[in-house]
Amino acid sequence: MFEHILVAVDFSPSWERLKAQLDRLRVLGCRRLTLVHVIASGYTQAPELTHRDHYQQRLDQVAESLRERDFEVETEVCVGLVAAELRRAAREREAGVILAGSHGHRILRDLLLGSTVLDLARQADRPLLLAPTDESVVLPGTRVCRPLLATDGSAAAAGAEAAFLDLLSLCQPGLVVSVGRWAEHSGHDDEQARIQAHVAELAERVPAGAFETLLPGKGRPAEEIARVAEERAADLIIVGKRGHNPMVDLLLGNTAEAVCRNARRLVLLVPDMT
Amino acid sequence: MTAMQEDSEIFPAQGMGFFERYLTVWVALCIIAGVTLGQFLPVVPETLARWEYASVSIPVAILIWAMIYPMMVQIDFSAILGVRREPKGLAVTTTVNWLIKPFTMFVIAWFFLMVVFSPWIPEDLGREYLAGAILLGAAPCTAMVFVWSYLTRGDAAYTLVQVAVNDIIMLFAFAPIVVLLLGMSNIVVPWDTVALSVLLYIVIPFSAGYLTRVVLIRRKGVEWFDNVFLKRLAPVTPIGLLVTLVLLFAFQGETILNNPLHILLISVPLTIQTFLIFYIAYRWAKAWKVRHAVAAPGAMIGASNFFELAVAAAIAMFGLQSGAALATVVGVLVEVPLMLALVRIANRTRHWFPAHEAPQPG
């Protein structure tokens, strides 16, 4: 999955922070990168076409420096709606994952302008890796290697679970987190038993001790996931999203969207491919 | 056929940003918010409307600059150097936009609003709606056309040339066309009022946008301009448009509550005009064997309107409470569904055009 990553390069001030993440991905098996810069075009966005050569040169410079670090690198400058063009480029170049920077998001701004990251997340037809680029976020300096799977045991989480189990062979022991309401309200015991059984099934598919399980019984899922990731030094949060069609795209899911909005760790959002 | 083409033809809305995709919904919400504000807190719009200087409402002027200036900052007028490339496409769109479109809009709107719908629309109000329709027809699209061009896999560079040429023509042609057609409708608008509107809402944003662009790129560089400044400026137009609409509907509350049917009636000539202009430009481009990537966005520019400018001009010339202002807002309301229908038509008739097109940028 991670062998070939398509990187969204926006040359904003936060791009340098995203670039700093690339070396950390090698441990996940990344060998090949496609760097894509999209000249945005849309409502009130006339494409800056005379700047095209400038961005191609800048991409070539970045590509050269990455080749010196043993990555195989291709580049592309294209024009259009950013999220749609990144999806197209990833599909045409058969990249396994799209990597994009994720700024802190404000709901009003996102509502008016949309958000490249949320558009990508809603319409993702392949895994999306989000790297927080806010200056206030201090990412772990080590290579990515301790994954956290957030699952509710539903079909929508199946892709995320498969990605997590695959990564365990490359990483330190992982974490499985499922947030429920069994400690908050009575009558949720069945839910707790169901998720315990589901996690036990996952555990049977990997060597013993490959991951530990935490089942917080109260709190908001996105906040609990972030808290556990912080406390247990997980550096990659893996979550699933619902299927891919225009109606479901609007409903990314509260937890997945909240994790994307507020992530202070790398987040891998995996669509339900069934 | 590329994957993106498949996407566009199946789910065009996925190739649109969030704001423009739901523009019709936002306008409908502004109608509700504005009418509610006007009914329950009329002091707010009345106070805002009272802040005037030289008969120009200062809050309204600020909102209108907020809509138009960010667009002008983003038009790269050096693109006009590409004007000699594929002159047939430019000839089609320029002729349709400036010599056909304003006049067909006038005839169609007059026929429906003054004749066919006369049992339901009083003559004076019908004349105000006609004035709004004339303002919509007098300027081709400047902002949304990049969305339509993208959805039809248009040539982005050529679309930019078309928009730059149209905006420069608009500096000189908008006022004479508006005065001529309003005069033919027996609507007297003094030249100085029209001239002031053009100065305030075309010349000043155009000049300020161009100067901002040149100075900032020279001083701060291309990357800062594209990726910092323009991103900060991006929310300004949508916010300006929505707040203007709320304010406008706060004044229009009585008209809408008394005549909700009028919104539907106004949309009829606007819809017919949209399809007619698209048909004329598109068939002409086909007859001249223009590339689809030029023909489709070219036809879209004329079919779609510079509704931000039309709203601004209607408010400046006729006031927030006018029927003209209401008619221009109906133009915003119907824009997205109509243009998405044209996108589908353009994508499904791609085979009408020469099969081997020049490589597309992007």
Image (cartoon, helix red, strand yellow):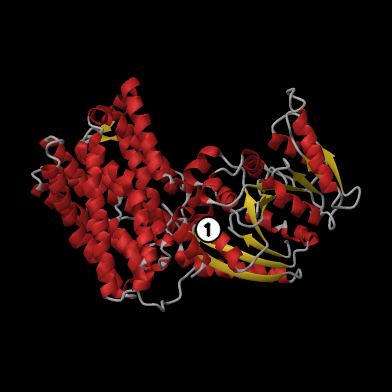
Please name the residue shown 32% across and 74% down the image.
B290
Residue A62: x and y in percent read 65, 67
Q: On the image, which quarter does residue A3 sit in?
A: bottom right
What residue sits right under mark 1 in the picture?
A: A84
Which residue sits furthest right? A208
Give the quadrant of the C terminus of chain A: bottom right
Please name the residue shown 34% across and 37% down the image.
B244
In the depicted structure, whether residue B151 falls above or below residue B36: below
SS at mark 1 in the image:
helix
Q: On the image, which quarter does residue B120 sit in?
A: top left
Please name the residue shown 38% across and 65% down the image.
B348
* Residue B308 seen in render: no
Q: Nearer the viewer, residue B321 or B113?
A: B113
Residue A196: x and y in percent read 81, 38
With B57 as the anchor, is A272 left or right in this view? Answer: right
Residue A224: x and y in percent read 74, 35
Residue B192: x and y in percent read 15, 44
Give the quadrant of the N terminus of chain A: bottom right
Mark 1 residue type: Ala
With A266 as the anchor, is B237 left or right in this view? Answer: left
With A224 as the anchor, is B289 left or right in this view? Answer: left
* Residue B216 seen in render: yes
Chain ID, mark 1: A
